[in-house]
Amino acid sequence: MQIEERTAGSVTILDLKGKLTLGDGDTLLKDKVHSLLHQGRKHFLLNLGDVPYIDSAGIGEVVSTFATVSRQGGTLKLLNLTKRIHDLLVITKLVTVFETFSAESDAVRSFSSAAV
Amino acid sequence: MADARLEVTDTLGRRVVLVEKPVFAIGRRTESDLRVVSSDVSRDHAEIVRHGDGYLVRDRSSRYGTFVNGDGVTERALAHGDRIRLGRSGGAELVFLVEEAGSSVSNTSRGPVSAVETLRQMAALLEGLRALGSGHVLDEVLALVLDAAIEVTGAERAFIMLADTDGALHFTLARARGQVTLPGKTFDTSHKIPERVFATGETRIVSDLLDGHLANAHMGTVALGIRHVLCAPLRLVRYLHEPGAAPEQKRIGVLYLDSREKGTLLSPTTRTGVDTLATEAAVAIENARLYRETLEKGRLEQELRIAAEIQQGLLPDARYVGKGVEVVGASVPCRSIGGDFFEYLELPSGDFGFALGDVAGKGPPAALLTAALQGLFTAHASSEGGPAATLARVNRALIRRAVQNRFATMAYGVLSQGGRLTYSNAGHNPPMLFTRGGVRRLEQGGLVLGLFPHAQYEEETLQLDSGDVLVVFSDGVSEAIDVHGEEFGDDRIVSCISANRHLDPAALLDCLLATVRQFSEGTVQRDDVTAMIVRV
């Protein structure tokens, strides 16, 4: 898996590309977000449009990254869920935990409407 | 009458020395004619004195005394075979020998002719080992090498240090004359020489290693009074198949020999012999190491098999028949051990509980958490409250114990005797209820277990009718893939169960699992496959 980083104002957009599974990029995401938090970034949007497959370990990683960001007073939202990831979030009820978006502009705007 | 000798046994091991002076001093200090290493031995402990035709032993006001055949003595005439103990029992012991040597006493010094002969035997032996693919385990090979090295050189002690993957040398085995293994602590010697030999690959001979003031700086070696050291690298030479290519060399450790007497340790013949021995030994050691790794791998597989048996043993009997209910479950791990479980419970209220859970991940880490979850669930299910309250308690208990990022999903249902089902679903694939009216998915519940301490769980109560069938399964069923990468999916579960509802639960479960197996034939099973059929 690869992670590309962009910014839109105060929001850091992380474009994830490739499978997110046990032993395949499952710690990459956490490490990346950790270092960004250290740089003072607080608002994250994970673009999952190019993640064809995610397993339970991958879900665990996204959740733990979400928890880490929340603990540091930041926010993490999800963008472009594939049907598979959406179904998985619905089954695990994690869909109630994450804010999800299908349009990047809406997602970025949502950060500024909340107190930034 | 032959020369008088003493067979000495102390922390160095066993050795034989000649009583070569009319007054032969024994003690811990360096000037002694016989240095004996033991905490009970005084610096000037005792002496053997020639007296007329015989010998006597005389104590020199030692701290812990001198004993002959168990009696404390100040002076005693010695006979062949007398045992002289210096200090308390467990201290150093000397056997006084004056008659012709029997076969039990070995000679200390060996001529070069005999050494070369031994080397040849050794080479043949090692060749044999190599041909056998080193059937001997590592320690046996090391002991063999060290004993041969002692035999060849006349050294008092020999040890092998092997390098780990980072190139750091580790003391591996030490032997003394008489094929005695020395405990690791006694070999508290300087690492400087071995490390230098290992780094440079050059054999080193160091004489009079420690004298004068240097002695105090090297406590380890000086306490033992070592003066002569021969240290050779253990070199592994690989001959490559490409013509003209230089052989590859890899150093795997060092062979270190030392002695207080010069013996043959310093002769050029010995040095060449030790170099040859070291090269042969390196091959034998490496083979033994590879062999041991294979053995350990085999042991790991064996342990996994046992773990798998234990895990299957933790699951309830596949079939349970209660009043107005029949249940059957099965779990097929994708590796030898898995992360799924199912459980049946006869609750204190008289109701029947059933659960199916799936811990994220596979293999041993998931299996450990699965065992913990199963235990937590069983403990919490028996206390007050319905399925939702139980899942909330299990969630909190799991968070207190679980590893980060590890979570589990679980569906838990309680069936009362009137056919009322109350269930709660913690992020698990929705179980499917097949009724006359159609198929219903049981989705009420809450988040996956083990991630959010404040997760809330809901429950739902349904009235079941006789003949209704409930199918609870893990994602290994719905997400089994075929050779084209297509998933089995919920729809195939529905059609399989709908078509075979008339079968009894055990046959229905077999049918479902067989359908999944046929579907994914030709692919590698990616996840544990677990399913349970409940019929009222």
Image (spheres, coloured by chain):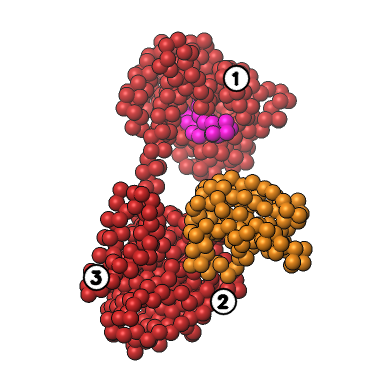
Looking at the image, is B450 positioned above or below residue B84? Answer: below
Question: Where does residue B381 sit, x and y in percent of width and height?
Answer: 45, 78
Q: Nearer the viewer, residue A29 or B190?
A: A29
Q: Earlier in the sequence, mark 3 or mark 2?
A: 2
Say what secondary structure mark 2 lies in: loop
Which residue is label 2 attached to?
B456
**CA separation, marks 1 and 2?**
67 Å
Which residue is label 3 attached to?
B500
Q: Earlier in the sequence, mark 1 or mark 2?
A: 1
Residue displayed at 46% across by 35% down: B181
Q: Nearer the viewer, mark 1 or mark 3?
A: 3
Q: Residues within 10 Å of mark 3 (few under 14, many from 20)?
A: some
- Report which colour depicts chain B: red
**Who's orange, chain-wise?**
A
> What's the magenta bit mostly, secondary-structure-wise?
strand
Q: Which residues are magenta?
A: B155-177
Q: Nearer the viewer, residue B216 or B387?
A: B387
Q: Is residue B176 magenta?
A: yes
Q: Amino acid at mark 3?
A: Asn
Q: Amino acid at mark 2?
A: Gln
Residue displayed at 64% across by 61% down: A77
Tell which subunit mark 2 falls on: B
**Quarter location, residue A94:** bottom right
Q: Are marks 3 and 2 on the same chain?
A: yes
